[in-house]
Amino acid sequence: MKLRGLYAITPEGVDAAKVRLALEGGMALLQYRNKKRDRAHAASIVELANEFGTPVIINDDVALALELDAAGAHLGRDDGDLSAARKRLAGRILGVSCYDDARLARAAVQAGADYVAFGSVFASPTKPGAVRAPLSLFEEARSLGVPLAAIGGITLANAPQLIAAGADLLAVISDLFEAPDIRARARDYAKLFR
């Protein structure tokens, strides 16, 4: 599986119609993020993404990812043991948040992460207090040999500098799901990777 391009992350309680528009525009991955653990909602989003052949990553919940037969899970610092998650997710994608820390990224890859995420790369409306990750991290982490995701405050305007810095995946929430034309915005992100 090629992990390069737009990595759409659902806002809390996102409407399925918005997700459909984003899927129609095209993306490499879709992350389902919902702190309320709404299994029925998650299942409907996974089913919708399957129509488009788009892999779905479940945020913070390995058990739910397995239950829904999702493509994988994405874990943060406090979401459990990565080696144990890797074993449970055999044959599936494991993504790991590494914030602003290349050492965390190295440890994640050693534990079996398929991609690592750095951010917030810019000020983020979703997580305004998030630590900022310097763009130099992408060059430093290139030697890890896994795709690198950038997250936090990403817009079409600042996306090219992230790709130039070495980001393979652009994790976008607000700039995609709050766009006046979600389908067109997803297409515009996809064009950046051609």
Image: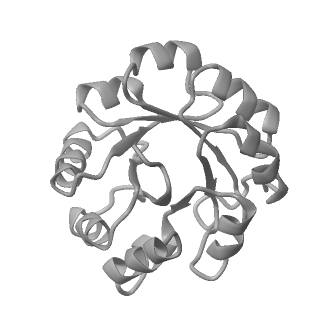
Residue 147, image x and y in percent? 59, 45
Q: Is residue 95 left or right of residue 103?
A: left
Residue 81 visible in rendering: no
Residue at image point 17% right, 47% down: 47
Residue 83, image x and y in percent? 56, 14
Vertical relation: 162 (above or below) 182: above
Q: Which of 8 and 144 is in front in this view?
A: 144
Residue at image point 74% right, 63% down: 165
Q: Quadrant of residue 153?
A: bottom right
Q: In which quarter of the image is the N terminus?
A: top left
Residue at image point 71% right, 72% down: 161
Residue 117, image x and y in percent? 63, 46
Residue at image point 62% right, 73% down: 159
Residue 177 visible in rendering: yes
Q: Nearer the viewer, residue 131 or 88?
A: 88
Vertical relation: 156 (above or below) 173: below
Q: Quadrant of residue 156?
A: bottom right
Residue 51, image x and y in percent? 15, 54
Q: In which quarter of the image is residue 16?
A: bottom left
Q: Residue furthest bottom?
A: 180
Vertical relation: 96 (above or below) 45: above
Q: Nearer the viewer, residue 102 or 126?
A: 102
Count of numbered tags: 0
Vertical relation: 178 (above or below) 67: below
Q: How is the image coloured?
A: one colour
